[in-house]
Image (cartoon, rainbow, N blue to C red):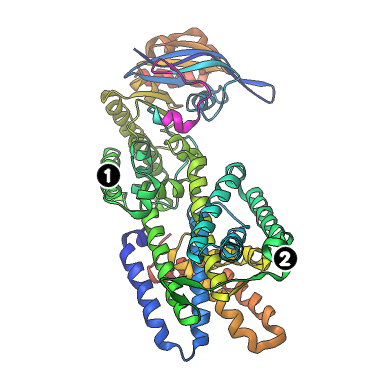
């Protein structure tokens, strides 16, 4: 982790280089589509990583915020006549507010109890989105009008690749900034010892809440992008499986690693696409591969590989 | 001037009175030791002082203000800091970062500024880093600054906790068995460190089993047994107090005390 802190700019430059150079290897628009999805999910995973990897607080309900962001850009323009960009911002603000209200009581819980409470929150959001069919279109979901900025219409894989990559970079820059700041040190301290952090003057409850709100905003923006990109949103966006997938991205890529969020998202988005050639065995092989990663790269892919490359770092 | 005061403090755990009507007053700038046999309630008393436990009865006053039942972070912001007997280190962070967290109560940036890494944050980081380096140097840990805490030996971690507490520039520093697990050389060093801290005007409340250390550094000693006050006084008084010798020190302790005199 200290290496990441000292090379903050290097991480950003490397990420920017990946985003710019990657399309050179794309033979078709389909690759742009997959890569755009990678960056969108990486954004959500990055926010969740701030919460899980840095502050050490589990959330198994983060797809709930993904769902709020996604439905904001569907409901805003359709029912409220708001432009998409304003709906996106409104969704992010709403997610932050919901996180604030939900986080106050549940962030007192620790470990498994917090996991189950956040799980419940995610399921709650999915149920509301399914049942309020007058607003949300129910289980079938609803169409999402394209994003328009100054008359330009963002549709198709290529623009969304650049939008999502650029946003991920901004998100990564903010996350790196945060980690190397008084707030960042305080949340990392909370991860290791809430008692010691408190005794040193860290308002533990408030810092946890702040990071929960920030991670919710990340997820919400990712959800809005997902909906705008797909042109359609269904309650599955906020579903239990999505929440698990986000948490898996964080753990697989590496807890407390900025780059890990991208790697985790890339694997969980790309692998299922690649494995479709196996037809019936797709899910089975995917599961085995994930188990293999966790057995052999216990600290997550990025920290484990960094450990091997950087020598004996503990 | 009395800086830390307990009045009729009491707390029970499962019906057992861990601390029973304890009153004491610590003068500013003193080294005030709390001793007693295992299970006497020394750490419990420190936990009451630092806000980790809420007393069932009694009051705690810090610099004249009633702070009974206040949360640890609020007490920290009033200038109370402590170390832990069972280490509470931020093991994923470097030694320097651990101590930088100690400076948290003096840091003045908002979360938005932190996200944007505004110049104020950069200045604050530089200030915090400087304060942390100074605290590490005081404890002889300058060379370990960039090592991850989990890679440091036990003795260094004990000193790291003191450096971290000092970085919060406390008025009152509670030390919970700082010499536990230290060899005689390290203990002697610790004695010098405690003296130096007190010389800077920081009040030290010391819980310690090493009698030689306690007798050497303490201005005043408070003896607990079974959660109650047994005696209080200077080193000489406590050492010769027949109650203390009989009820607390016992035969083994008497030998220990005799050696401490010599």
> Disc 1 is attached to a residue of which chain?
B
The quadrant of the picture occupied by the C terminus of chain A is: bottom left
Task: Please give the residue where the numbered disc 2 appears in the rendered image.
Answer: A138
Number of other residues with Cα within 10 Å of mark 2, as a class: few under 14, some 14 to 19, many 20 or more: some
Would you identify the image quadrant in which residue B44 lies?
top right
Residue A197 picture location, percent across and down: 46, 40
Relative placement, left or right, of A284 versus B243 is right
Residue at mark 2 to residue at mark 1: CA–CA distance: 59 Å
- SS at badge 1: helix
- In the displayed structure, would residue A223 be above or below residue A201? below
- Front residue of B22/B128: it is B128
The quadrant of the picture occupied by the N terminus of chain A is: bottom left
Residue B104 picture location, percent across and down: 37, 40
Asked if disc 2 and disc 1 are in contact, CB closer than 8 Å, the reply is: no
The residue lying at 32 percent from left, 25 percent from top is: B202
The label on residue B133 is: 1
Span highlighted in magenta in the image = B62-76
């Amino acid at each position: 982790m200290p290496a990441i802190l000292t090379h903050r700019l290097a991480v950003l430059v490397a990420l920017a280089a990946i985003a710019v150079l990657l399309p050179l290897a794309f033979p078709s628009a389909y690759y742009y589509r997959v890569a755009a999805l990678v960056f969108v999910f990486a954004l959500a995973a990055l926010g969740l990583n701030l919460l899980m990897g840095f502050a050490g607080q589990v959330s198994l309900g983060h797809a709930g915020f993904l769902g709020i962001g996604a439905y904001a850009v569907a409901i805003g323009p359709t029912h409220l006549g708001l432009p998409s960009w304003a709906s996106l911002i409104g969704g992010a603000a709403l997610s932050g507010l919901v996180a604030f209200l939900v986080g106050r009581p549940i962030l007192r819980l620790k470990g498994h109890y917090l996991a189950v409470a956040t799980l419940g929150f995610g399921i709650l959001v999915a149920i509301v989105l399914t049942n309020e069919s007058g607003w949300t279109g129910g289980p079938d979901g609803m169409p999402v009008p394209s994003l328009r900025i100054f008359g330009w219409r963002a549709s198709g894989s290529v623009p969304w690749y650049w939008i999502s990559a650029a946003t991920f970079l901004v998100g990564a820059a903010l996350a790196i900034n945060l980690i190397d700041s008084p707030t960042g040190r305080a949340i990392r301290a909370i991860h290791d010892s809430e008692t010691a952090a408190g005794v040193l003057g860290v308002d533990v409850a408030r810092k946890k809440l702040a990071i929960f709100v920030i991670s919710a905003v990340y997820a919400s923006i990712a959800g809005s992008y997902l909906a705008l990109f797909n042109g359609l949103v269904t309650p599955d966006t906020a579903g239990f499986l999505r929440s698990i997938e986000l948490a898996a991205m964080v753990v697989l890529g590496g807890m407390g690693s900025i780059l890990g969020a991208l790697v985790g998202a890339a694997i969980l988005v790309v692998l299922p696409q690649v494995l479709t050639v196996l037809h019936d065995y797709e899910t089975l092989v995917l599961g085995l591969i994930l188990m293999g990663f966790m057995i052999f790269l216990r600290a997550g892919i990025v920290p484990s590989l960094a450990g091997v490359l950087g020598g004996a770092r503990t | 001037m009395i800086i830390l005061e307990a009045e009729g403090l009491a707390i029970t755990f499962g019906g057992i009175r861990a601390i029973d009507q304890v009153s004491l007053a610590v003068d500013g700038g003193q080294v005030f030791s709390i001793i007693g046999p295992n299970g006497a309630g020394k750490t419990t008393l420190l936990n009451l002082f630092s806000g980790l436990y809420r007393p069932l009865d009694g009051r705690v006053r810090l610099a004249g203000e009633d702070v009974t039942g206040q949360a640890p972070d609020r007490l920290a912001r009033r200038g109370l800091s402590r170390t832990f007997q069972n280490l509470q280190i931020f093991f994923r962070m470097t030694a320097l970062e651990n101590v930088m967290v100690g400076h948290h109560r003096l840091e003045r940036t908002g979360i938005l500024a932190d996200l944007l890494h505004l110049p104020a944050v950069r200045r604050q980081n530089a200030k915090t880093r400087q304060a942390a380096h100074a605290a590490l140097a005081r404890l002889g840990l300058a060379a370990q600054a960039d090592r991850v805490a989990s890679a440091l030996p036990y003795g260094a971690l004990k000193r790291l906790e003191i450096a971290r507490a000092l970085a919060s520039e406390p008025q009152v520093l509670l030390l919970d068995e700082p010499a536990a697990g230290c060899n005689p050389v390290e203990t002697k060093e610790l004695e010098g460190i405690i003296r130096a801290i007190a010389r800077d005007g920081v009040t030290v409340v010391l819980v310690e089993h090493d009698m030689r250390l306690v007798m050497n550094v303490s201005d005043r000693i408070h003896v607990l047994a079974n959660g109650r006050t047994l005696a209080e006084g200077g080193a000489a008084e406590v050492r010769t107090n027949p109650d203390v010798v009989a009820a607390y020190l016992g035969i083994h302790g008497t030998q220990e005390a005799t050696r401490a005199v010599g």
